[in-house]
Amino acid sequence: MIIAVDGPTASGKGTIARALAAHFGVPHLDTGLLYRAVGRQCVLDGGNLEDPAAALAACAFPESLLLDPELRSEETGGLASRVSVHPAVRRALYDRQRAFATRAGGAVLDGRDIASVIAPDATAKLFVTASTQARARRRFAEMQSHGRDITLEAITADLAARDERDRSRKDAPLVVAPGAVVLDTSDLDRDQAVAEAIRIAEIAL
Ligand code: C5P
């Protein structure tokens, strides 16, 4: 059993993927975290994010970096989206994601290209989305609760830029894969979104 959860930033896909993993009793991989680690390592190395060789070298980040709270920041999300355009980076992270997806007992993976590239054979495919306004409002509330001084306008602009980069890149762009069910969470609260995701997955499994 492989459950693929794809979607744009702040769509709720991470929350949904974690809840699905708990519900079905299988492990979960947040693949965005791998790209975040590459972006962060590239900056720590003093490398140029736009240089494919520097970004590829950063794929050898230490495992301990995955635990760094800085990886969760909006800034690091932006770094991740810049290194993730390089095909060599995507290839370097492929085996690790594929091995996780095909482990015995099943798995839930969330990202941008799980159903399209990493696990086109997934048992259930969800494409979680929400309007730009709903996603920006969520991210804004989350950042305010962490005491961050940032405007809704700045967050909206950042989300739009990241969406554009993820959708327009040549290699593994964010797309609704064949067979994926679209779940729009704009008007759903957390519990409603999770319940709907479980319902969709149960039909497919
Ligand atoms: O999901 P998250 O916001 O953590 O992802 C950060 C960035 O990593 C995304 O904007 C995207 O550019 C990249 N990413 C990707 N493929 C994935 C997961 C994330 O390109 N499977």
Image (cartoon, grey):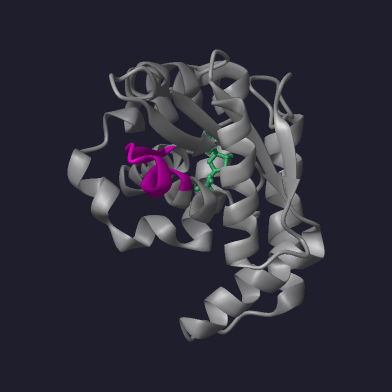
Residue 145 falls left or right of residue 41? right
Residue 148 painted magenta: no
Q: Position of residue 131 (x, y in %)?
A: 81, 57
Instruction: Establish if 71 lies above or below 81.
Output: below
Write the start and end of the magenta stretch as one range.
Answer: 20-30
The picture quadrant for ligand 1 comes to: top right
Residue 96 falls left or right of residue 112? left
- Give the quarter of the image for residue 137: bottom right
Question: In this view of the protein, can residue 129 be seen by the observer?
Answer: yes
Q: Nearer the viewer, residue 194 or 93?
A: 194
Q: Position of residue 91 (x, y in %)?
A: 45, 16
Q: Position of residue 146 (x, y in %)?
A: 46, 81
How many numbered badges does the structure rendering display?
Answer: 0
- Residue at x 25% of width, y 53% of height: 67
Q: Residue furthest top?
A: 121
Q: Position of residue 159 (x, y in %)?
A: 70, 57
- Residue at x 62% of width, y 43% of height: 199
Question: In this view of the protein, can residue 50 be seen by the observer?
Answer: no
The quadrant of the image that shows the C terminus is: top right
- Give the quarter of the image for residue 140: bottom right
The quadrant of the image that shows the N terminus is: top left
- Residue at x 50% of width, y 19% of height: 118
